[in-house]
Amino acid sequence: MVIPLLGLKNNEVAAIPCFASPRIDSAAASMTTQTDTSNVQTIPPNPGGAEVVRYFGCWLDINQPQAQFPIQPSPVDGPYASGRRSIQELIRNEHQCLVSEIAFTPAPAQNGSTPSVSDKLAQRNLAIVESANPGLVFSRRIPQTFEIRPSTSRLEHDELMIDWGNVPAGSLATLYLPGIDADDIMLLAARKYRSHRLVRIDGHMVKFDTGGITYLPIPFTDGNFPGLLTVDLPEGIAKGEVFTIVVRQVTGERQTVAMTHRMESYRPGWRHIVGSFQLTIPVREKGDILPGQERLLSNLRWIERVIPAGNRWSSVFGKYVAQIADRVDALGGDSSKVAPSASGEWREAYKICRLLALAAGLLIAMFLVVAGTLSGGLRAIIDMPVLLLLIGVVCFWIRNCRPRTCQLIRTLIAGAGIATIILAVLATLRVSAPHLVNALVASYVITAVAAVVGWIKGCFK
């Protein structure tokens, strides 16, 4: 029996196999020990020549909370002693690509084959992102993350071919590719095309009008690169309309085509599609869209918290989450109250996050008050546990709730402000404490500095 293993790109998980049988404990066993007996079947021929049907399947456990694989697996096939994440935490989009393989022993799929060139592989890439009717600008902003791997043949540059289908006139699109220089894209476009609609926005982003077909050249480079395609639909769209966009990666790389009955030779100069996805945009009323977008934002924020800052997906996913948050606000929700949650139960998660913020503020106040009113051994006995508890609460809060900078600043102001008031009252009552004045000054300075920083960052609007 052949067992599929993790697919890796740039030393990161890019494809995850699913089975009908329960997954092995990847913390204790190698993935090569996985079994899938339900999908091992012998298909005997029918003596009369009739068609024989057998069903195969698997459990798509992409929303289960159990830790399974590290972002960068080592060793490649396990076991993995640390850093395991749930499958949900390894996903980088609301919709995922599904690939199935026909494992036919006399003619197996060739190494390196893709669904575009092998009849053993089938792939489905369909994303559905709803737009409001007619809605504010951000409610009509349609984001979609994707990943591109430029060919390494150096024969001819790859291109993204975007078929805008029935997208209405007046729509605008942006493409963010942090791993590719926008200047290189613009230079290639000027060389390859007599005219084009691409406009540089910054070092890694271009924008363009929609309509017809848009071609965007991809510079030669090694590796897989995440990107974010964003489409802004115009005013005037109506409930019930459905728009379809198809994005294809076209390459000039020569490749063998694997067929069941023959192996075709290389075709010099033959350009073909190596990957594609379809983005479907149904137009609905904002009240129907909002609950799903709030759950999505909650899930995405849960995933975002585990992506390392230097990871290649970090900036793309951050922009993606920010755009979903803007959609929630434009649809009538409040994205600041949507807390990270693996299950999408963001209201319960928000309550917990509020309690953690409150606890952090009170512990800050307690630490400063104890520092100003007690001395000697008693001060150390109380203040040290309070400090350790404060650090633990803040770390847990940041890790699980992903509070924004302004939330952290406001919590610091609240805690230090409470301490300032308490210490000021004690000083007015002439309470005798050797460190009272110093602690009062420190808490006041902390409150003032945090308030100034918060004002500069716009935290009090």
Image: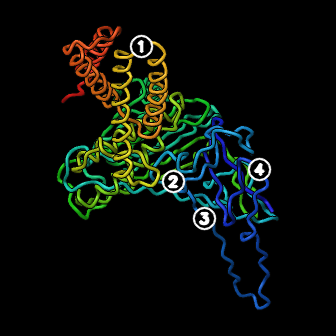
| Label located before the other in sequence (4 or 1) | 4
| Label located before the other in sequence (2 or 4) | 4
Residue designated by label 1: 375
Query: Which kind of residue does numbered mark 2 sit on?
Result: Gln
Give the image location of residue 32, x and y in percent: 78, 52
Q: Is residue 240 left or right of residue 344?
A: left
Query: Which kind of residue does numbered mark 1 sit on?
Result: Ser
Q: Are marks 2 and 3 in contact (CB under 8 Å)?
A: no
Q: In the image shown, does 216 or 133 lie closer to the viewer?
A: 133
Residue designated by label 4: 29
Q: In the image shown, does 98 or 375 lie closer to the viewer?
A: 375
Q: Residue at x 28, y 10 (%)?
A: 441
Q: Is residue 191 left or right of residue 408?
A: right
Residue 36 visible to an observer of this rendering: yes
**Label 1: few (<14), some or many (≥20) within 10 Å?**
some
Q: Are marks 2 and 4 in contact (CB under 8 Å)?
A: no
How far is the residue under mark 2 from the one under mark 1?
59 Å
Q: Residue at x 71, y 42 (%)?
A: 80
The kind of secondary structure element at disc 2 is loop
The kind of secondary structure element at disc 4 is loop
Residue designated by label 2: 96
Q: Quadrant of the C terminus?
A: top left
Q: Nearer the viewer, mark 2 or mark 1?
A: 1
| Label located before the other in sequence (1 or 3) | 3
Give the image location of residue 336, x and y in percent: 29, 41
**Label 3: few (<14), some or many (≥20) within 10 Å?**
few
